[in-house]
Image (tube, rainbow, N blue to C red):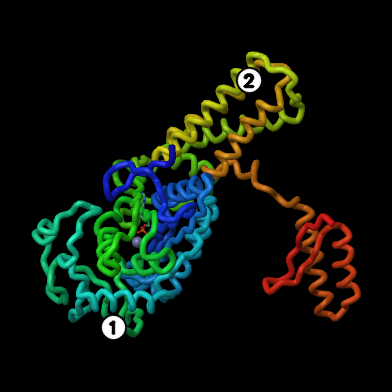
Amino acid sequence: MGIKVYNTLTRQKEEFKPLRDGEVRMYVCGPTVYDYTHLGHARTYIAFDVIRRYLEHRGYTVLMVMNFTDIDDKIIRRANETGEDPKELAERFLRYFLEDMAALKVKPADVYPRVTEHIGDIIDFVKKLQEKGYAYEGSDGVYFEVRKFRDYGKLSKVKLEDLVKGARVEPGEGKKNPEDFALWKKAKPGEPKWSSPWGEGRPGWHIECSTMSTKYLGESFDIHGGGSDLIFPHHENEIAQSEACTGHEWVHYWLHTGFLMVNGEKMSKSLGNFITIREMLKRYNPEVIRLFVLQRHYRSPLDYTEEGIEHAKNNLERLYNTLENIRVAMEKAEISFRWGNEEFEAYKAVRNAREEFYRAMDDDFNTAEALKAVFEVSNAVNRYLTRVKAPKESILRKAWEFFRAVSDVFGIFEDYFREKKAGEAEALIKLLIEVRAQLRKERNFALADRIRAELRQLGIQLEDTPQGTVWKKVKV
Ligand code: AMP
Ligand code: ZN
């Protein structure tokens, strides 16, 4: 039994088998950086974070790439409104995004390719499509000719006839057919631009993801994800570009998250019904937000309500309370020389719930079901602790190890399980490093060397590296 994932491409749950043994290559569409990150984004990025964490937990090496759209119509429009330089505006919101993700304990991607740093790669990709006859130059840009790509519509199930019916070429647009989309946009006065074989301009939106995912993950890779609003046209167009270019299958599993909803509508920047992560974090612990998201399966819509968040908060408090109960009990717990009924019962409850947790996560990353198993363990261990006078270490350890696995996968209970360097000692060592650096500047090498030597005696080794002085613990 292995992991099963729901593939939007086939509309079915399929057995998960990466193209290379032991390695999963995964691309998630990143944000267009012109505003603060909101809870809807958090829903999607926390969901993919947990999918990535689970794959790592199950022993895969995951290579994860997420792009930043740092040049785009929306960025230019917003910059014009605020009078800011589009580049600076994008840079600012990109940094805020990274801060917000770190605050939410979303593990960083291995690479965050930015459009503005891959213009050359994008131009090469467009040139290839032109050489292969899938792209043509119009008066205002280069376009992808959709009707030349025979598989168009395979992801979203849209039909070319319907697309053609519903659209027309607007006056001033340089495309041949209404369904064609831009690969390269020629610059209008005052817009940011780069030179290209088609004159000065900038890339279209879809081409960046085809180009940058292929650059880092190869011509075929395992998982491509995003919110379900991206299925059409974004991901459909990405498939057309990539498969037209290589002539073979590009992405094996397409995963899409359901929307975070507010009063029956998608939370979005354009509707103005959003709550930023910054606002949320003023009121709630980041783990509350994670638990709120994980209480639903990633493909289901998730309603944002105060009660929903409060519910997550109470649940998290309950689980922390259990962890604290286990920790305190472990300090006095006994080695087992015999088990009674209570031990057999508690052991069985933990074992079954653990199995249930993995079964749920294997079933298309069903965090909502997996969470039920977490509460079963919590209830079982609390029941055990109220029933026995002298709790056995082995039972508590089983529960503790289960919670450690949950922490690893869900990214919660971090304070309990993260390895910490002792806080105060760390601060003192940092201070000594600074003092030593100052002494060296003043050419007082004797005292500087003495600090280093005496720290070494205490088992702390200072090393001068290109990144500055770092310290390590040494045993011998
Ligand atoms: P954006 O930068 O707004 O285009 O969105 C970046 C990512 O967040 C995309 O994968 C979107 O699908 C996702 N996203 C935006 N709003 C929501 C929402 N309300 N619920 C879930 N995902 C969302
Ligand atoms: Zn994309």
The quadrant of the picture occupied by the C terminus is bottom right
80 vs 404, nearest the viewer: 404
Q: Residue at x 49, y 40 (%)?
A: 291
Q: Write down the residue under mark 2.
A: 384
Q: Position of residue 210 (x, y in %)?
A: 34, 66
Three-letter amino acid code at the position of disc 1 = Pro
Task: Give the image quarter of residue 344.
Answer: top right
Instruction: Identify the secondary structure beneath mark 1.
Output: loop
- Indicate which disc, 1 or 2, sits on the residue closer to the N terminus: 1
Please say whether residue 79 is visible from this viewpoint: yes
Q: Write down the residue under mark 1.
A: 189
Three-letter amino acid code at the position of disc 2 = Tyr
Q: Residue at x 39, y 50 (%)?
A: 40
Q: Position of residue 44 (x, y in %)?
A: 40, 50
Q: Position of residue 63 (x, y in %)?
A: 48, 58
Q: Position of residue 92 (x, y in %)?
A: 48, 68
